[in-house]
Image: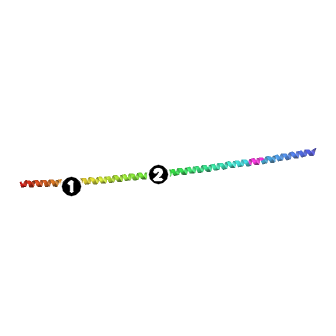
Amino acid sequence: KREEEKIWRDLEEVRRQAATIEEGRTRTMEKKLADRAIQQERDLALRQNRAKAIATKTAALEQKKRTEFLQMREKQLAGQEQRRVSQDIMRQKKMQAAQSRLQNSERAVAVQRSQLEARLKANQEKAERLERMRE
């Protein structure tokens, strides 16, 4: 009977040890699963952060390109406006020069006309004197 009790105690001890071993295996498996889940979460967060960084960088580059394009367009428009203003100024100067030449020509014509009229008058007076002298 004692031996039977000893066998039962040994059997109980073996069962406890087997349960402890099984519990350790279960905890090890749970830890591996938890570690794997944590690593997957980290990997996912890393991929999301990379995607977000790429999207931010792309958006910044696009904004920079838009800004550069707008600045270039503004420069072009300013250059066109400057050329237009310069052309207007040149056109006005040419018109003023033409106007000045026209006025000078008109003055010259007026002077020539008055000289011609003076000669005609002098010739007329001379002809009248000659006519009177003949009478």
Q: Residue at x 36, y 52 (%)?
A: 89
Whether label 1 touches label 2, CB < 8 Å: no
- Helix, strand or loop at mark 2: helix
Residue 59 lies left or right of residue 109; in this view the side is: right
Magenta extent: 26-31
Q: Does the magenta segment cover residue 119?
A: no
Query: What's under tag 1, amino acid-wise?
Result: Gln
Q: Main secondary structure of the magenta part?
A: helix
Please state the horizontal and vertical placement of residue 6, each as a whole percent of the image.
90, 46
Q: Residue at x 66, y 49 (%)?
A: 44
Residue position for label 2: 73
- Mark sitting earlier along the chain (1/2): 2
Please state the horizontal and vertical placement of residue 72, each as a whole percent of the image.
47, 52
The residue carrying pointer 2 sits among few (fewer than 14), some (14 to 19) or many (20 or more) residues within 10 Å by Cα, namely few
The quadrant of the picture occupied by the C terminus is bottom left
Residue position for label 1: 112
Please state the horizontal and vertical placement of residue 79, each as a whole percent of the image.
43, 53
The quadrant of the picture occupied by the N terminus is top right
Residue 29 lies left or right of residue 55; in this view the side is: right
Cα distance in 3D space between marks 1 and 2: 58 Å
- Helix, strand or loop at mark 1: helix
